Amino acid sequence: MIPSIHKRGSETVGLIRYLYGPGTHEEHTDPHLVAAFDPLTPDPGRDPQATYGQLQRLLDQPVNALPAGRRPKKHVWHLSVRASPEDPVLPDGDWAAIARRMVAATGIAPDGDDAACRWAAVRHADDHIHIIATLVRDDGRRPRLHNEARRAQAEARAIEADYGLRRVASGDGTAAKRPTSAERYKAERQGRERPAREELRETVRRAVAGAASEEEFFERLAAAGLLIRKRVAPSGDLLGYKVALPDDRNKDDEPVFYPGSKLAPDLSLPRIRERWALPAEAAASVGGSRPEEPALPPVTGPAFARRRATAATWQALLIIDHGDDGTAAAQIAAAGEILDALAKTSAAHTRAELREAAFVFERASRSHVKAVRGHDRALRQAARDLVHSGPALGRGEDGATTAMLIDMAFFLAVAAANWHAKRHHGQQAAAARRAAEHLNAAYQAAAAHPMAVLGQRGHRLAPRVRQRQADLLHQVLPKLAEQIRAEPGWPALAATLDDAQRAGHDPAALLAEATRRRELDTATSVSDVLVWRLRRSAHLPALPESPHGTPAQGSQRTVSPAPSTQPVPSAANGSSRRR
């Protein structure tokens, strides 16, 4: 249940007309009173004799009783209370009780206070009510509304528990603005998948993912088909921007523009510019100017970009687990760019789940912990590589490295959820967990073919080779060996161990390294986890060659990146991987 306190107003009858009217886009149905300060309050929705003016005069009577000089200019208080989409439709009686609890909790009408403010609760949709009140009590004094929004949130949590409704995590003021009822109904009428505000937020986030400059950012917005308006100072400096969908228009057939700051707090132009910041020590070393970038190998294709993104994601995991709060927050924010870039370049069979993962993780990317930008450059460069490498084919080496990256992104989302949970960021932790669920589903789709190919290779190993890998497994992981050998992914792991040995590596050392940092006891498919960790750390092709010496069907040869000196993670902080 979500309470929202709106801006105070100066005209009671104007708000009454809106609440009882058809709505901006005919979305209001059967407007009527469910509760009020006085049971005899006139209801223009159900009583043909009642008028808006009668209700307005009754509510405003204490205001009008004051001398003109003492009347507050902004005397209209407005609170909406909305149920979650999965909640049952509540009857009027329940909404009336909820309204009384809200006005009591916020200080508008405390229980037992006969001189409290006058108020009325109007319902014009199944899922929410609006409460209108005037901010002068019957005794002429003003109500005490200190921290009214926080008290409304606390009461909403109690109401959820009492009515068995969905428990919503308490907010901290860093969430993006939710679409209004009018925006949702408009999207439904136009057959849109999401309201324009959410479509724009997703498009802008994808445009900024890995962007290296304002010019590139605005070029991406234009390429996505958005209408753009820039706010320029008299000096010529760019101050801000607005975007609109070409076919989202108002009643005057004009495009509906949204400033970046109204899409999400971190999409304002000043906040976007922070992403291009240098680490403080690097900026100091060059007197505040940008140092020369180290030479990086050119991106040679989607598979190579995904390998580099996997390595950057592992480094981010280490920082989230062991770094200070500011740098960890920056890694989590940049992780959102990785997911946006991955969703933008994904193959069709993984696109829906990756898009949902990026969409819900957006809430986890912001908190009151200020991100220390600059230290997240590796992840942002990885996001840039993903975008510039183009869409993956979803098969062969592309598909296998996609599964490898999604596997790592899953653990990054779990690490972000744990990081937020430890700091009591309820909404962010919940969002990261939901993103992990979508990433797990995307992994299933991405990994099915490459794991099957690797499994076939494992089944073709000579019996003595299979036994050697089994003995190695018992030697390095004696407590998990039998579990791993019973898993469907064991043949793929055996093939991977054999590939590593053929490439000149010590498979026992690689296996020990892959399990050293994080325990594996709670991973549902330990073999899947180890396959991708080993293939990445040993710099093996994600999908090996066929027995005839040619790449597996649909694969493309890529150049492997320089070896990493860091070990690879397994299960994140004891999380359970549902595969």
Image (tube, helix red, strand yellow):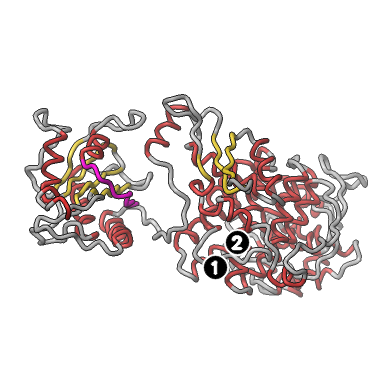
The picture places residue 63, in percent across and down from the top left corner, at 14, 50
Whichever of callouts 2 and 1 sits on the residue coming sooner in the sequence is 2
> Which residue is nearer to you in this view: 99 or 49?
49
Q: Which mark is residue 132?
A: none
Q: Residues within 10 Å of mark 2 (few under 14, many from 20)?
A: many
Label 2, label 1: how far apart the Cα atoms are:
9 Å
Q: Secondary structure at mark 2?
A: helix
Q: Which residues are magenta?
A: 1-12
As for residue 8 lying within the magenta part, the answer is yes
- In the image, residue 302 sits, relative to residue 578, either above or below, namely above
Q: Give the left or right position of residue 211, taking residue 504 as reference.
A: left
Q: Which residue is mark 1?
A: 419
Task: Report which residue position mark 2 lands on.
Answer: 332
The answer to whether marks 2 and 1 mark residues whose Cβ atoms lie closer than 8 Å is yes
Residue 44 as seen in the image, left or right of residue 206: left
For residue 94, side relative to residue 47 (left or right): right
Q: Residue at x 72, y 66 (%)?
A: 288
Residue drawn at x 56%, y 58% is 365
Q: Is residue 280 above or below residue 528?
A: below
Give the image quarter of residue 231.
top right
Three-letter code, disc 1:
Trp
Residue 488 in sight in this render:
yes
Image location of residue 405, percent across then percent down = 70, 54
Query: Residue 252: x and y, percent?
Result: 44, 25
Residue drawn at the location 62% of the way across and 66% of the way down: 372
For the residue pair 403 and 367, the one nearer the viewer reads as: 367
Q: Is residue 202 above or below residue 503?
A: above
Asked whether 23 falls inside the magenta stretch, the response is no
Q: Residue at x 85, y 51 (%)?
A: 298
Image: 232 above or below 168: above
